[in-house]
Amino acid sequence: MLDTGLKVLSEIKTNLFNSIIYVKEFVFLYLLIILIIYFLVGFNSLFLSLLILFTITSLIFLNIVGRKRKSELDQIKNIIGKIRGNQFQNSEQIIMSRNLKNLQEEIKLMFEKTKNDIEYLKKLERIRTEFLANVSHELRTPIFAIQGYLETLLNGALNDDTVNKYFIDKAQQHTLHLSTLLNDLIDISMIESGEMRLSYRYFVVNEFISPLVLEFQKVAREKGIDLIFSPARSGLQLFGDKNRLRQVLVNLIQNAIKYTEKGEVEILVIEEQKHGRIIVRDTGIGISENDIDRIFERFYRVDKARSKEAGGTGLGLAIVKHLIEAHGSKIEVKSEPGKGSEFSFRLKK
Ligand SMILES: Nc1ncnc2c1ncn2[C@@H]1O[C@H](COP(=O)(O)OP(=O)(O)OP(=O)(O)O)[C@@H](O)[C@H]1O
Ligand SMILES: [Mg+2]
């Protein structure tokens, strides 16, 4: 009995304590009403009775308000505790009482955002691990090959004129591949860490592309492919970093030649209202719909054997994408397996 009494008292104390934030409003209203009663009935026994009655009602009222506030605070504490303890799988599980609906929505949004942030960080971590594994794998292949050729040469092949040159050639091919790979990796890491500074200038687009096309004429001819340049109106100037754009075009033209067996590779510049669009189009093997979304990933190659044979690292398009995005533009692809591919991007004029 005494126990229950003490418990009720302590609960009332907590409730009153919780309602303390309304104390100023309460005292103001309390005094005002007392004053009104005083003016109405004067100072007499009726006033005293009304004063006691009003004080008791007020305390009951405060107790109710405090209890409600405590229950709301408990609900919020409970939800936050559960979020901290990872007890919710999705935001729909966060349910609060009706008068806390606004807060419930805010907490749900915060929960979703934190969940997405964590998933994004986990994804980044996964990508980083995958990237490291890929880099190690890509480095290991040429290093092992070079090691193998050198060992064979040292073990006697050096004096065998029928094979020595072949092995040295092979070892050299692998060192070239290694250095391309390292340069690509350095480029990627510089772009991603923001260290690569681009210097934008206006340049005459036809004068920029013609020598590049000439450079690739020989390789194309050797493969029996026509390399065609369809220039824009003479004097058309576009805005960008010429060195980086050369890297982009070299990659795209190399790919177009590499993945085309017969037909032609065409480089076009089309003038639009505020932009110039540079297009590299081929009549090659094309890319399937499933692969199109992935070709810009680092190290992604549709046909690993074929790309490697041609000395590819699978970093080319990843670099292209980064560089074009650094120009505030987007690289676009259209492709049909067996028919050919078209890579294009716009530059401001
Ligand atoms: N014009 C194209 N036609 C068909 N497939 C293409 C074309 N361009 C790219 N691809 C596909 O996309 C993949 C990724 O291209 P990317 O340029 O990144 O790598 P790569 O050419 O294999 O090697 P790298 O460019 O690093 O030497 C290629 O392996 C190839 O499968
Ligand atoms: Mg490439």
Image (spheres, rainbow, N blue to C red):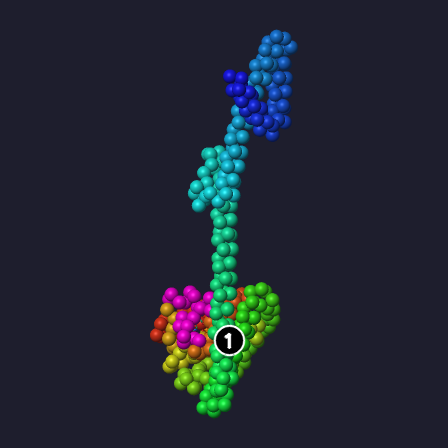
Report which residue position mark 1 lands on: 143
Is-magenta flag for residue 296? yes
Quarter of image, ligand 1: bottom left
Q: Is mark 1 within 8 Å of ligand 1?
A: no
Can residue 34 be seen at all in this image of the molecule? yes
Extreme residue in the top direction: 45
Callout 1 secondary element = helix
Q: Tell me which segment is drawn in magenta.
A: 289-308
Give the residue displayed 44% in from the left and 68% down from the top.
300
- Total labels drawn: 1
Q: Nearer the viewer, residue 26 or 148?
A: 148
Q: Quadrant of the C terminus?
A: bottom right
Compared to residue 5, the image places residue 287 above or below, namely below
Compared to residue 301, the image places residue 122 above or below, namely above
Give the residue displayed 60% in from the left and 66% down from the top.
195
Extreme residue in the front direction: 155
Can residue 12 be seen at all in this image of the molecule? no
Q: Nearer the viewer, residue 244 or 344?
A: 244
Q: Amino acid at mark 1?
A: Ile
Give the residue displayed 46% in from the left and 43% down from the top.
87
Q: Position of residue 109 (x, y in %)?
A: 49, 45
Q: Position of residue 75 (x, y in %)?
A: 50, 35
Q: Position of residue 197 (x, y in %)?
A: 61, 69
Q: Is residue 42 left or right of residue 267?
A: right
Residue 16, located in which quarter of the rendered image? top right
